[in-house]
Image (spheres, rainbow, N blue to C red):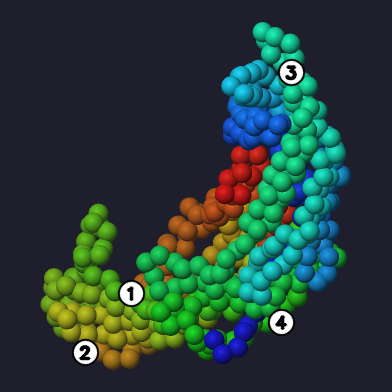
Amino acid sequence: MSALITALIFAISEQTVNNLLDDIVISLETNTQNYQIPDQSFELDLAAIVNFDFTEIYLEKLKITGYQATMISPDSIDLDIESLNLKVSFQYKYELNGLIDKGTGLLEIINTTISTTALSSSQKTVKFSPLNTKVKVHDILIEVNKPDSKNQNWVFAFLKPELKDLISDQVKSIINSGIEAIDLGDMYTSFNNSDLAFNYSLSHPLTITDQMLKGESLGIFIQESNPNYNPPIPKPVDAVITEIEGIQFVASDYVLNSLSYAAFISGLLNFTITNSNLPQDLPFGLTTTTVGLIIPELIVEYGLGKPVNFSCNFVEPPFMNFVDNNEWSAQIKALGYMECEIFVDNEVALKLGVSVIGDARLYLEEWKIKGTINELKVDKVEVISATIDVNTDDVKDFINSSLETYIKTINDNALKNGIEIPDFGKFDLKDSKVKTGTGFLYLLINPSLSFTLEDLINFLG
């Protein structure tokens, strides 16, 4: 593309980040009891080398207080945790000069403080890098027991400095890995079995204020085999995000029309209907006899029972636009023009120009798309060439009666009950709504998050 455009804008408020942080902490504190931690082993030099093995490690308690995420202009987010406390139980075994001792124990980590900065570190994607991560373990308590002998706590007292460093390093590594995992990569998605892709890489670097993080994205569908073009469609409207709440998206109808254009030049909008691709349970085929009920001139010209094929190609990409709507719903209008040919015995019997218009109102409920297709109909039919005379009004009425049945089926069976939108991991996006203005769609999401320690570990890879 010769010039960068912005067709998609997204933003997340500082308050929403902290709300999600609340969800994470509550989920972790609630769901981590009896979580098993992998076995640990290390050596300690106490004049002689002591080998320690810790097994059956279980997290019994986790408490996090005084946490806060703060957005810092122009490119970073600070995270501070005043106090992290946890308690784990374990089995231990250590070996010193050939002598082996083993038993059970409890480890309590007290008043660990954490601070770090997530720095936006890419011009083209959403990616963060950790900066100045600090972890301080103020104190740890270790109490061990041996069922068959005296306590060996004096041995483990030597471990406190070593364990403080080990715990600090591991917590720091977890935090840094978590920040580095915030990486959307090339922000480019290919679609299987098509020549289409969606490029939503940043058109400008992320901007961060004291209230929100905002990103401006290309938001363009492209033909993957020929991606470097400017589609001949209207440029995106100038749209801004002014509200400071939730997660917000503003999408220009440029996004829709870039999809329409990419599908058009890829040939995905063209279709052919023959007897071979009709449903097997259809009680009739495409012949001059059946199609002749609508166009009787086919029977006169070609006789009964001759095979008939249909082929339709859009002459130009269909155009779609978002319409101004004061309600929390999306109003979308569309129009297109295609040429359709009717073949009999591989001869073009009729070539028609068909104008199509559509109108729909959609809304979100419980993260489902609901609404109504108000109109999808053929507006005009014209004869381009023909070997027969034909009444275009009859053709138009037949197509529209078929479309009415099709629309009613979609409205009653799909849009009335709602079309499920794919989930995004552990995020609950049911508190969401959408509306349209002239040339753009606005989506507001107030997300919640349910997270476990195992989810966190899987996320960190």
* CA separation in Å, label 4 and label 1: 36 Å
Determine whether the residue tagged by mark 2 lies in a helix, strand or loop: loop
Q: Quadrant of the N terminus?
A: bottom right
- What secondary structure is marked by label 4? loop
- Which one is closest to the eye, mark 2 or mark 1? 1
Graded by Cα atoms within 10 Å as few (under 14), some (14 to 19) or many (20 or more), the crowding at tag 3 reads: some
Residue type of the residue flagged with mark 4: Asp
The residue nearer to you, when weighing 138 against 396, is: 138
State which tag comes first along the sequence, 4 or 2: 4
First along the sequence among labels 2 and 1: 1
Q: Earlier in the sequence, mark 4 or mark 3?
A: 3
Task: Calculate the distance from the C-alpha at mark 2 to the C-alpha at mark 1.
Answer: 22 Å
Q: Amino acid at mark 1?
A: Phe
Mark 4 or mark 1: whose residue is earlier in sequence:
4
> Toward which corner of the image does residue 254 lie, by quadrant?
bottom right
- For the residue pair 366 and 219, the one nearer the viewer reads as 219
The amino acid on which the numbered mark 3 sits, given as a three-letter code, is: Gln
Pointer 3 residue: 152
The label shown at residue 271 is: 1
Q: Amino acid at mark 2?
A: Thr
| Dot 2 alpha-carbon crowd within 10 angstroms: few under 14, some 14 to 19, many 20 or more | few
* Tag 2 residue: 387
Q: Nearer the viewer, mark 4 or mark 2?
A: 4
Regarding residue 286, the answer to whether it shows in the image is: yes
Please provide percent x and percent y for residue 372.
56, 61
Using a 10 Å C-alpha cutoff, classify the residue at mark 1 as few (fewer than 14 neighbours), some (14 to 19) or many (20 or more).
few
Q: Where is residue 45, by image quadrant?
A: top right
Residue found at x 29% / y 86%: 351
**Residue bearing the label numbered 4:** 238
